Amino acid sequence: MATGKVLGIAIGPEGGGSLVREAVSSANFVEGKGVEGDKKFGQSRGRQVNLLSRHSYEWFERNFGRELPMPGGFGENVVIDGIDPNWLDLGQRIRLGEAIVQVTTPRSPCAGFTEHVDGDKVSHFVGHVGVMCAVVHGGTVRQGDTVTLLED
């Protein structure tokens, strides 16, 4: 069974228009709604949590010569290490601390994101912005928690 670690958690203040989310040490994940306190909380059935690998930050630094603040610089909710979410199957369930999320779709980069990071083209970021997940079992997720891929 593959395991990893939660490196960081970020939430975007409700009503906030900024792409960037702010780092927090823990967050409450609510089944069917997402990350409590996040600007996207309760707005979608399948796009509740953006899960990203630390490799995306390393890729960005190598290719653009600068760092983004981690977590939250990519607009994500959770940064993990040890498992690359970009290669997970749709429907894969992942335990993050007390919560369980399920991969629903790859995250698509947009013009707003590209502009935010001073990128040249949206296509540069395809495959580097993580996956979107639904919360299928709520609970608290803390920085440093274990990440586990669950078997059906």
Image (cartoon, rainbow, N blue to C red):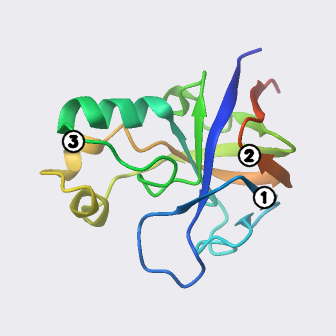
Residue at the limit of the structure toward the top, as seen here: 1
Instruction: Write the residue at 81% across / 23% down.
Output: 151
Report the amino acid beneath label 3: His
The residue carrying mark 1 is 29
Report the amino acid beneath label 1: Phe
Query: Is residue 50 among the parts visible in the rendering?
Result: yes
| Earlier-in-chain disc, 2 versus 1 | 1
Instruction: Write the residue at 56% across / 69% down.
Output: 12
The residue carrying mark 3 is 124
Location of residue 35 (image quadrant)? bottom right
Determine whether label 1 and label 3 are within 8 Å by CB: no
Report the amino acid beneath label 2: Val
Taking the image as shown, residue 66 lies to the left or right of residue 3, namely: left
Which of the two marks, 2 or 1, is nearer to us in this view?
Answer: 1
Question: Is label 1 in a helix, a strand or a loop?
Answer: strand
Residue at the limit of the structure toward the left, as seen here: 120
Location of residue 135 (image quadrant)? bottom right
Position in image of residue 88 (x %, y %): 57, 29
Q: Which of 89 and 30 is in front in this view?
A: 30
The residue carrying mark 2 is 101
Which quarter shows the C terminus? top right
